[in-house]
Amino acid sequence: MKAVRISTPGAADAMALQEVEVPTPGPGEILIGHQAIGLNYIDVYHRSGLYPVDLPSGIGIEAAGSVEAVGPDVSGFAVGDRVGYCLGPLGAYAEKHVVRAASVAKLPDDISFETAAAMMLKGCTAEYLIKRTYAVQTDDWVLLHAAAGGVGLIASQWLSHIGAHVIGTAGSDEKCALARAHGCAHTINYASEDFVAQVKDITGGTGVHVVYDGVGAATFERSLECLRPFGMMVSYGNASGPVDALDTGILAQKGSLYLTRPTLFSYYAEAEAAAQGYAALFDVVRSGAVKISVDQTYTLDDIVTAHKDLEARKTTGSTVIVP
């Protein structure tokens, strides 16, 4: 089968499409034949070495397809089941992959493989951020960075559905328009506007209850200025680079702020918690409150171009790779 492999960390060109043996599922595992694969920024972190992995390695943690083989000690899955996953292990950029059955979700019949691959990691990220890390309530004020990205477009719709006041930032007027069309009540072009001043103006000087920041170094410090006293800074990604070391005294100076650096893997580590998260995502998508936008499609042969486009911020919404 075809699979993308990395042998050294580096730029997009570090990835290579190779012919490899089809893996055999072991105890507690299933083999999935992929129909669609998700592209996510965490894949860039694994490829570049920001998040170190044992090399050589596969890459990619999200995909959807059909069960092709079931290993020993697996219950609840059978050959032919439609499934999706977003918790790894690394190696989703491939025609087939072996995954722990406990981390796999059965797909409802009305959710396509493409939609599942486009939404599971991003949608589950949105779920834990807005339902568990900071449980957003009706009329809360929220600042959502990268609101036109994959997580952003899902989170903005979900937040709007909850009844929050969503201020979204993006890097162009076109992306701001896209964010508004997906639930942001207010948008700020952070490439040309001072987002701190704009947030203060929009909120009447009060600030927001929570900031969701997947951008990292470029926005972190100024995001703290946007919070009201006792507000929460949720730093969940590093698209612009990792955040520098922080003097925690700043949190006191700016109003007894809260700061967290959560991960999907912590929130979804237990099978029951993962199942609840998958169910919440499937329910909100099937209700129509959250619509999944697949704006780019690549093949495995185009994987280097896909990563370059993602890092250059040429993409919007979700991106799907077809094997």
Image (cartoon, helix red, strand yellow):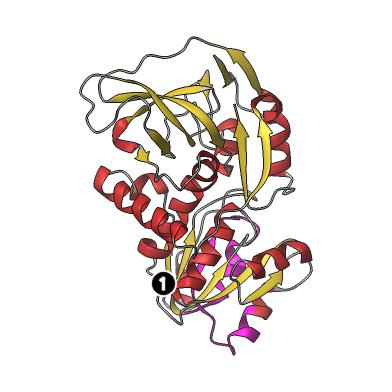
Residue 4: horizontal and vertical position, in percent?
59, 22
Q: Does the magenta stretch include residue 96?
A: no
- Range of residues picked out in magenta: 199-228
Residue 23: horizontal and vertical position, in percent?
42, 14
Q: In the picture, which quadrant includes the N terminus?
A: top right
The part of the image, by quadrant, that contains residue 102 is top left
Secondary structure under badge 1? loop
How many discs mark residues in the rendered view?
1
In the orientation shown, which residue stands out farthest toward the front? 109
44 lies left or right of 119: right
19 up-or-down from 13: above or below? above
207 up-or-down from 5: above or below? below
254 up-or-down from 11: above or below? below
Q: Which amino acid does label 1 sit on?
A: Val
Q: What residue is at 51 percent from the left and 59 percent from the top?
A: 246
Q: What residue is at 51 percent from the left and 50 percent from the top?
A: 122
Q: What residue is at 43 percent from the left and 61 percent from the top?
A: 284
Q: Mark 1 points at which residue?
A: 136
Q: Which residue is more in the foreground, 166 or 8?
A: 166
Q: Can residue 244 be seen in this view?
A: yes
The part of the image, by quadrant, that contains residue 101 is top left
Residue 6: horizontal and vertical position, in percent?
59, 21
Q: Is residue 200 magenta?
A: yes
Q: What residue is at 65 percent from the left and 51 percent from the top?
A: 240
105 up-or-down from 3: above or below? below
